[in-house]
Image (spheres, rainbow, N blue to C red):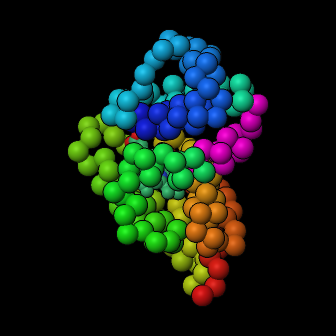
């Protein structure tokens, strides 16, 4: 995976718990305390998983809690800072979600070795969208955390339900 997720986790930890905590997490994951991960670096998926695991342990958060905290940080702080152009002209969570597959394809178009998640869409009824998350990384709970954060930001969803390890149901408020 590219370095973006680890870089975002780093910013989240440093902003909220300080740099010593981040160095402890790196060390706990078997890395040098002063490792730097840049956006375009290739980070093996196992290393990303290990960092998330150690972060849960040191911050005393369950995977669900970490996924929700990460979702809020990703949408409200990290994406606006690092990928601002992709949010331009987006006025609603629905529009952003419907563009999500295109956004991920576009953002990595010129980046070698990138392998972003893919998304399929199916409307179950006019207000209920089923999104299929396709990724070998099985971070569907992180996907749900980000979707929930979008709902909080735009106040648009009644609920978000994880149907399986690759499907999520999003119920929008009726028009
Ligand atoms: C709007 C701007 C966004 C940008 C620019 C963006 C960009 C990226 C990038 C660069 C990666 C790493 C890809 C790789 O390593 O190949 C990534 C991963 C990911 N993104 Fe996004 N993203 C955005 C929004 C979202 C939103 C709104 C969601 C969910 C609702 C989401 C869900 C995910 C997940 C779950 C991953 C982890 C990788 C995986 O599961 O395979 N992203 N994103």
* Quadrant for the N terminus in the image: top left
What span is in magenta? 60-71
Image quadrant where residue 125 sits: bottom right
Please indicate whether residue 63 sits to the left or right of residue 125 in the image: right
Magenta span main SS: helix
Q: Residue at x 61, y 57 (%)?
A: 149
Q: Residue at x 42, y 26 (%)?
A: 37
Q: Residue at x 49, y 33 (%)?
A: 6
Tell which of 17 and 121 is nearer to you. 17
Please indicate whether residue 68 sits to the left or right of residue 137 in the image: right
Image height check: is 136 above or below 167? Answer: above
Tell which of 22 and 164 is nearer to you. 22
48 inside magenta stretch: no
* Quadrant for the C terminus in the image: bottom right
Q: How many marks?
A: 0
Image quadrant where residue 39 sits: top left
Image coordinates for residue 21, horizontal then vertical, percent: 64, 22
Residue 165 visible in the picture: no
Q: Residue at x 62, y 26 (%)?
A: 18
64 inside magenta stretch: yes
Please indicate whether residue 18 sits to the left or right of residue 101 in the image: right
Outermost residue, left side: 110
Image coordinates for residue 107, horizontal then vertical, percent: 32, 50
Tell which of 171 and 118 is nearer to you. 171
Outermost residue, bottom side: 175
Image height check: is 137 above or below 117? Answer: above
Image height check: is 70 above or below 170? Answer: above
Residue 5 visible in the picture: yes
Image coordinates for residue 148, horizontal then vertical, percent: 63, 59
């Amino acid at each position: 995976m590219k370095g973006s997720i680890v870089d975002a986790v780093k910013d989240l930890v440093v902003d909220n718990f300080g740099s010593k905590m981040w160095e402890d997490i790196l060390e706990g994951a078997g890395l040098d305390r002063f490792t730097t991960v840049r956006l375009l670096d290739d980070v093996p998926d196992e290393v990303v998983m290990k960092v998330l695991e150690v972060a849960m342990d040191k911050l005393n958060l369950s995977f669900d809690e970490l996924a929700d905290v990460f979702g809020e940080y990703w949408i409200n702080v990290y994406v606006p800072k690092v990928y601002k152009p992709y949010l331009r002209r987006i006025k609603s969570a629905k529009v952003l979600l419907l563009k999500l597959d295109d956004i991920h394809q576009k953002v990595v178009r010129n980046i070698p070795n990138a392998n972003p998640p893919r998304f399929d869409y199916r409307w179950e009824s006019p207000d209920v969208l089923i999104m299929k998350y396709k990724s070998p990384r099985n971070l569907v709970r992180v996907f749900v955390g980000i979707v929930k954060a979008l709902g909080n930001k735009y106040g648009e969803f009644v609920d978000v339900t994880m149907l399986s390890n690759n499907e999520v149901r999003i119920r929008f408020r009726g028009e």
